[in-house]
Image (cartoon, rainbow, N blue to C red):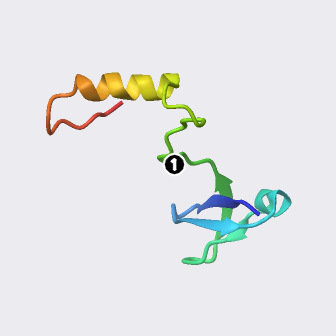
Amino acid sequence: MPFYDFECNSKHTFEEQCSYEQSKKGFECPECGKKAKRIFSVNKVNPTFGYKSTIWNQREKHRKKHMIPNQSYTG
């Protein structure tokens, strides 16, 4: 079963391992007990698809090559 992220009205976020059907119903927040709805989040996985020459990897190499040292990338 996959993990889904949830958020309540008080902005507490948490994840639960559950079925898709259960994720649509929602859960109670473990911190405040209010009803929490499923949210969509993005993780920091770099999609390589098994190949080092994907467009994603080429773009990242180019971006890192042109960054000034100690400068963070803001998107």
Q: Is residue 38 above or below residue 40?
A: below
On-image quarter of the C terminus: top left
What residue occupies the far right of the structure in this picture?
Answer: 21
Dot 1 corresponds to which residue?
43
Q: Amino acid at mark 1?
A: Asn
| Left or right of residue 12: residue 61 | left
Q: Is residue 35 above or below residue 50?
A: below
Which picture quadrant has residue 18? bottom right
Q: Is residue 60 above or below residue 44?
A: above
x then y, percent, for residue 34: 64, 71
x then y, percent, for residue 33: 63, 77
**Front residue of 50 and 74:** 50
Q: Is residue 34 above or below residue 54?
A: below
x then y, percent, for residue 3: 67, 61
For the point 14% across and 39% down, which residue is it? 70
Instruction: Categorize mark 1 by other alpha carbons within 10 Å: few (<14), some (14-19), many (20+).
Output: few
Which picture quadrant has residue 27? bottom right
**Front residue of 1 and 23:** 1
For the point 60% across and 77% down, which residue is it? 30
